[in-house]
Image (cartoon, rainbow, N blue to C red):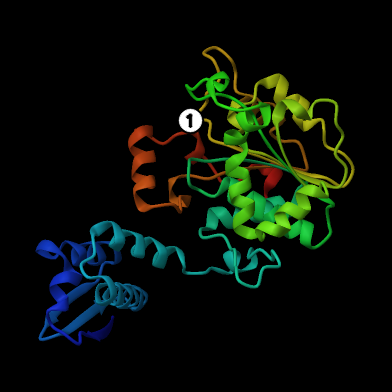
Amino acid sequence: MSESTLTLSDPQLALQLFGPQDNNLRLVRNQLAVAITHRNGQIRISGPAESVRLATEILERLKDKVVRHGAIGQDEVAEALTQATVARVSPAIERSELAIGNAGRRIRPRTEGQATYVEAIRQHDMTFCIGPAGCGKTYLAVATAVEALKSKSIKKIVLVRPAVEAGESLGYLPGDLHEKLNPYLRPLLDAINEMVDFDQVKFLREQDLIEVIPLAYMRGRTLNQAFVILDEAQNATVAQMKMFLTRMGEGSKIVVSGDITQVDLPSGVTSGLRDAVQRLHGIPGISFIRLDESDIVRHPLVRKIVAAYDGTRHEGSQGSRTSPAGER
């Protein structure tokens, strides 16, 4: 057992820090399994050493937020808990840190599942990743592609998405074809803009070193020494998936990611992602990674929303995280 003490400069801060009926305090206490008491401006935390360390770190962070901004809500406490608990860096996560060449940004997986995903991409020419919203499928694939481009192991990045409507009509969007397609491709550009300066992204796109295109435009091409990412792959048909995978040229890598619980294809049309996972399973050189709700790193509510909509564990959380072909 371990113990630590946190001092409040103003005992009245405890009311704002702990929240109504000590609800904020209860969140920290329950999630980390520690005992927390308060008396005369002294907060005493006791329990397992690692849990005490985390609880102290979280309460210090929340105390500073209260001092700067006043009262805090339970959402902020939950977010602080998530950030602190996923920040414990295992050797696998540390090894998977991505070198994107931006001194101001350090990108590393935040869960063991994400670390497995990054290592699978690095070690295999083709990787499939299935997982729910918010688990980093697109972001980590793009980061790994940027790392490969910076190290000159590939010559260009190609970001691909199916232009499939999720209940909205493409024809009613304003503008020309490029402007109509932009909403579909925007998430990929947002991911890469987080890692590479805007001017550099513009330069790389002008030099055709970064290409962002709809899936339909891939037909007839062969991509050599390219890092190709197909995002939202659950919305590719079986024929489109075959067409996409056979674009792979010499020295290329392909990452296919999607969420098979969010298919927007017409009723009766088989998802190319689901078909490919079944059809290609067991082929050497192809890795299959499955992430689940424990890998979600967006707002803490996203994990609860995914679980509520799923009701039971979906395919993205069944079995091992990697297939036999992807074992390391």
Q: Secondary structure at mark 1?
A: loop
Is residue 117 something that shows in the picture? no
Q: Residue, x 56% and y 26% (percent of image)?
A: 174
The relative height of residue 58 versus residue 134 in the rendered view (above or below) is below
Residue shown at the point (9%, 63%) measured from the top left: 21
Position of 328 with respect to 265 (left or right) is right
| Amino acid of disc 1 | Thr
Name the residue that disc number 1 marks. 261
Is 217 rendered above or below residue 128? above
Q: Return the x and y of residue 303 as percentages of the image width and height.
A: 38, 46
In the image, residue 274 lies at what x, y percent?
60, 27
Neighbor class of circle 1 (other Cα within 10 Å; few <14, some 14-19, many 20+) is some
Q: Give x and y (percent) for residue 147.
A: 72, 60
In-front residue for pair 264/29: 264
- Residue 190 higher or lower than 107, as above or below: above
Residue nearest the observer in this picture, 165 or 244: 165
Residue 299 position (above or below residue 229): below
The N terminus: image quadrant: bottom left
Give the quadrant of residue 40.
Answer: bottom left
Residue sitting at x 35%, y 60%: 79
